[in-house]
Amino acid sequence: MARRGAARIAYRLTAYTDRRYVDAVAVQEPTFFILTALAERPLHGYGVMQAVGELSAGRLTLRAGTLYAALDRLTDDGLVVVDREEAVDGRLRRYYRLTDHGAAELHAEVERLRANASLAAARLRKAGRLRPAAGGVG
Amino acid sequence: MTTMDGLRRWYRWLLLAYPRWYRRERGAEMLTTLLDAARPGQRRPDPRDALDLLLRGGRRRFAVPRGPAYPAHLVYAVAVAAFAGLAAAAIAGQLAWPVAAPAPQPVAAQAAADTAMPLPASGPPGRYDDPLALNYGVETGPRALRQGSARLEYNYVAPADRPVTAVVEQAHARMAAAGWQVRTLQHGHHVAEFWASDGGQVVHVRGYFALSTVDPVTVWVYSQADRWMTPLVGGAGCAGLAAGWLLAVWTLRRFWLHGLRGRLVAVLFAAPGLLGVGVSLLAGAYEGLVVGLEDGWAPNDSLFAAAAFAEAGPLAGIAVAGLALASVVLALPARSGPPSPGTRERLWRYGLWSLTSVHLAFAAAWGLVVALFLAHGQRLLDANGPMDLIPFGYHPMNPFMWLYATLALLYLFGFLASPALLSVSVPLLVTGRRVARAAGLRTAWLALLVAAVSAVALPIAMSTPLGHDAMTWWLD
């Protein structure tokens, strides 16, 4: 128990990235995939929807209402900003990009997931129940 | 019309679920995304997309603006919504009650009274109605009878040769024989009584004995209240709650669009309004508790919100007026673009003068009350108190009554709030001396100094014999 608490504190201490505090609370899966989709390059709304579908291997289907609610929240939190606007055939497209703060948050989430996965793998290995899997963890 | 035009129209219609300001910001972009995501040849939106848009749009309408002041936003939204719900329930209750539980028809009531008591009445029937008297114990009768509050009262004197208990027992038997549903006859200390109902009428017969030289018997005739009263008031309360929440969200969004001056003016109006909101909600909670603790649900229990507003009195009016004025201020066009370079100086100026004004308003209220006491207090000491000073009487439509209420608020609130306000003024005076001098605000700083001194002097003045007498007189 004490060890877990210490690990949590240590994790919180390392969660200061880019001189800004990154909350180590787990982000929801759609948010995680939106941030991941924007990690590579700026994307417009439909681009994000497509990228999230591909990244999750078709498991997640973002609908427009959900996407823009998430983008609003991420913009308010400073994780995402509008990169540019384009008008194509009279249609407005707004591109979003990940901020440094957003990248730090995503990095923190990746570390959190990695730590959780390592912990689970270690337990399974200790119990002799870890089966090798393609691209498996541990 | 192409397939895409039809789909675009559908999506435009669905996007109406979002508030207008949001559609202005995001509508075109969302429409592009929705059309980009459409399947080739798609004519209508996917039902799941439509539901998603409707739900998210609704949530956006009700979403409290985020930001550093988010907790304060939430408290404000909850308070305004609860107040609006209470107000809507009060208005609906007051309007619906005379329809749901009308006064009994004199002819039918007389017939019912004659059935119960074939004796000559002592006089003409009396009319009574007290719909806001909630939970006054056994007087309200069995809850299942759903009697209204308006009633006709017939008074009799029991014949000298018959005990009053026998008269009431005979009335009980007569009502039963006439087809009325009669409740059990109850004998209490000097009292014998029963309730009966039939065809939308409720009768209460009570006889008193061994209390005086004559034994009086009273028959009250009520009409039965309709069952829709409670759901109607509940529905109105929910509608008010939703409307109040929407108003709160709108005012909060507008608040942050305005510059410093707009915000300060809005706060100036909203502050007394919120005080009234707090008092009204406390009264509502008290009345709700009274209604909740009683045994069963009486029809006029749905008037608990109206009873709360009656208790809050002018403060409920101040709440409505304050919130309405703040909303009007916030509805005015807001400034656009970045704040001007002199914002910091303006903030200091407004801060210093606002605090000065509030301190001096408290002191002026105290001075006015003492002056009124010196001029009129002794003369009115044995009368009804300071309310007698209001020209044209204590009535909500009388502007002098509002002046009186404002003075009363400032006097009482000043006594309580002055020390708290000093905890802001004194640090501001200490830390802001150099800033004020540099920004050319020395006069404002000196004014606040004088005002703060008045705030220190206020409790001392209150504890003097004159201050004490004036307070006793005012609070009488």
Image (spheres, rainbow, N blue to C red):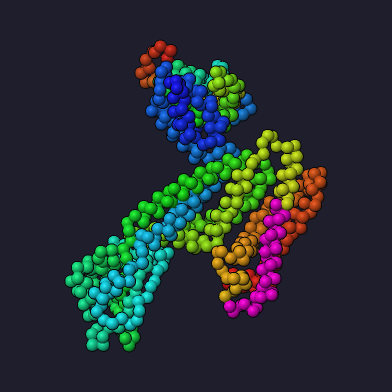
Instruction: Please report the residue visible at 40 percent of the width from the left and 50 percent of the height from the top.
Output: B235
Instruction: Please report the residue visible at 74 percent of the width from the left and 47 percent of the height from the top.
Output: B349
Name of the residue lying farthest toward the left: B177
Q: Which is nearer the eye, B369 or A114? A: B369
Instruction: Please report the residue visible at 66 percent of the width from the left and 36 percent of the height from the top.
Output: B336
Residue B333 x %, y %? 64, 41
Residue B304, can we see it? no
Residue B247 vertical placement versus A97 (above, below): below
Identify the image quadrant of the C terminus of chain A.
top left
Residue B233 x %, y %? 40, 54
Residue A106 x %, y %? 53, 23
Q: Which is nearer the eye, B194 or B12? A: B12
Residue B249's quadrant in the figure?
top right
Residue B225 x %, y %? 33, 61
Q: Which is nearer the eye, B233 or A124? A: B233
Q: Position of A45 compared to B237: left or right?
A: right
Q: Position of B414 compared to B83: left or right?
A: right
Query: In this picture, which residue range is highlighted in magenta?
Result: B354-383
Name of the residue lying farthest toward the front: B1
Magenta residues, dominant SS class: helix
Residue B47 vertical placement versus B282 (above, below): above
Instruction: Please report the residue visible at 18 percent of the width from the left and 71 percent of the height from the top.
Output: B177
Residue B108, can we see it? yes
Q: Which is nearer the eye, B201 or A15? A: B201
Residue A32 vertical placement versus B158 (above, below): above
Residue A26 vertical placement versus B138 (above, below): above
- Number of labelled discs? 0
Residue B357 belongs to the span the image colors magenta: yes
